[in-house]
Image (cartoon, coloured by chain):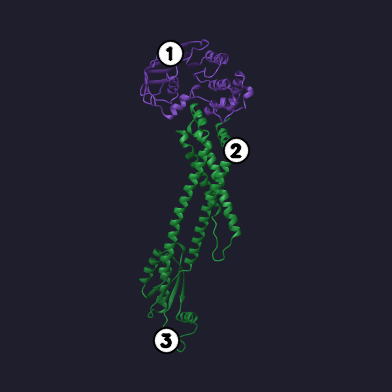
Amino acid sequence: MTQARFVLRESAKTLYRHPTIALGSVLSLTLIFLLFMIFWVAALSTDRFYTDMLRQVQMEVFIAESVTDSGLVRIASAVRSIDGVDSLRQVSKEDARQELARLVGLDLLVGYDTLNPLPRSMILTVKQPSLTVAEMMRIEQTISVIPGVEDILYSRDWLVKAEQTRSAISTVGFAIGLLILLTAVITSSNSIRLMTRARGFGFHQMMLLGAGRFFVAAPFLLEGFVIAGISALFGWLATWYGHTRVEFTQFPIVLPTAKYILLFCLSAAMLGAISGLLGVRKLLR
Amino acid sequence: MQGTLVHLSDIQIRTKRGEELFSGLNFTLLAERSAVIIGGAGSGKTTITELLIGMQRPISGTIELFGEQFQQPSRRQIRRIRRKIGGVGGPFGLVPSLTVAENIQMPLIIAGERIEHQKERMLKLLGEFSLLNHAVQYPASLTRVEHMLVQIARASIAYQPLMIIDEPSAGLDSRTYARVFDHLIQASRSGRSLIILTSEKPPMEIPNCDHYTIEKGMLV
């Protein structure tokens, strides 16, 4: 028997000999990973929700009355060249009047056609990576020094709050994620410890014959790898099944991509292997 | 020292309870020679075994095994030394989760030997020790003598140059004890060195053998 075959056989033997412990650890780990997946999906969906909302944030640049039409073209070109600016739409006095009429419900400037006091403006959208308070402030400052620009308005307070909420969600998510992973490690290392308890004497004997610690521990590392990997896959399948059954109309549920799911299952399996090592470490001393 | 398998010089050991067990133990075993060490219960026979396989460390003195200093051995050195020693009895036992065949095969699996060689050696030893019918049994279903025979077979499979047999008579009647000794004599004749630690005089003479008694923490 080769060493690799021995390790594979011993690993399968432990699962076969302690099916209830193995099933128990698969179920408990599946639940833990399911919790992690639900949280992951919730975090991704919330992030998408905020991103979509932030995409609607616009900056309005008001132009001074004294600026000529050629000056307006110059300002528009200067604004477009600012790093982070995505699109720019010019609003004439007439457009502003129509917009006001739309908002108020009646045209307040009837009879004052030649004396329209509403300013000309430019409405600009910002590229996705620049949709942060700091970036918006940088763009605002750059625009404010362009001659002819009178005022700049955007929902800065809302943006600050959105950013704070997003950051709070990531911090809490990170903490909960760590907690869940720690629970996964403890749970699987405990069940592996349970499976190894009866085999301490056998380990000791193999080491007296000159077996290395890795050789003795390898079946349990493999076992932890398999149990945690399968549990992560089950957790993902349960989440996916739930996704096919539940639908929200207000915002879309975002699932991680296949690449990330694969990475998640592999990381979970690695975590299982580490748990296996933790489970047998006392016996290897 | 050329041709020396074991050389213990001035060994002092303190037990876990803090008692000094040996006060300057000296012992030398040359290649292809054997030694029988006789001592009563608690005289330190198993401690000598443990010393030779790196389970115990002396508080003073020097240990040389297979030409290597074994004072503060690293894990790697302990593994290397253990692979050269076949152990029977005392701290040695069978792996309960492995069958008789797998237990016998284990030193070769650990050494990473070719599968054909493993099978060939295992079958030969199962035959020699009349264990073919027990090949797929687990140690829990074996008798004491079968247990002992499996251990001797395991201690022989990898042609380990040194075999340590700790209390071969334990729980055996005189007839089976003699049967076990037959195998030990064969092992000795095949050029292997044996250290037999026992509480009573062996029933048969081992070839090329020196006899010692543990008295007051010394070998005489």
Q: Position of residue B11 (x, y in %)?
A: 37, 20
For mark 1, what is the residue? B213
Spatial separation of the CA atoms under disc 2 and disc 3: 89 Å
Sequence order check: which comes first, mark 2 or mark 3?
Answer: 2
Is there a contact, CB below 8 Å, between mark 2 and mark 1?
Answer: no
Evaluate if marks 1 and 3 touch, with contact meaning CB atoms under 8 Å apart: no
* Parent chain of label 2: A
Near-viewer residue (B208 or B140): B140
Q: Give the mark toward the camera: 2 or 1.
A: 1
Binning the other alpha carbons within 10 Å of mark 1 as few (below 14), some (14 to 19) or many (20 upward) gives some
Q: Dot 2: few (<14), some (14–19), or many (≥20) neighbours within 10 Å?
A: few
Q: Amino acid at mark 2?
A: Tyr
Query: Which numbered dot is residue A63?
Result: none
Q: Dot 3 corresponds to which residue? A: A115
Q: Chain of mark 3?
A: A
Neighbours of disc 3 within 10 Å: few (<14), some (14-19), many (20+): few
The kind of residue on which mark 1 rests is Thr
Residue A222: x, y in percent?
54, 39
Query: Is B118 placed left or right of A168 in the picture?
Result: right
Q: Of residues A256 and B139, which is closer to you in this image? A: B139
Residue B26 is left or right of residue A254, and the answer is left
Identify the residue under disc 2. A16
Residue A274 vertical position relative to residue B210 in the rendered view, above or below: below
Chain represented in purple: B
Identity of the residue drawn at 52% across and 25% down: B93
Residue A272: percent from left, percent from top: 51, 43
Amino acid type, mark 3:
Leu
Q: Chain of mark 1?
A: B
Which residue extends farthest bottom? A111
B192 above or below B117? above
Q: Colour of chain A?
A: green
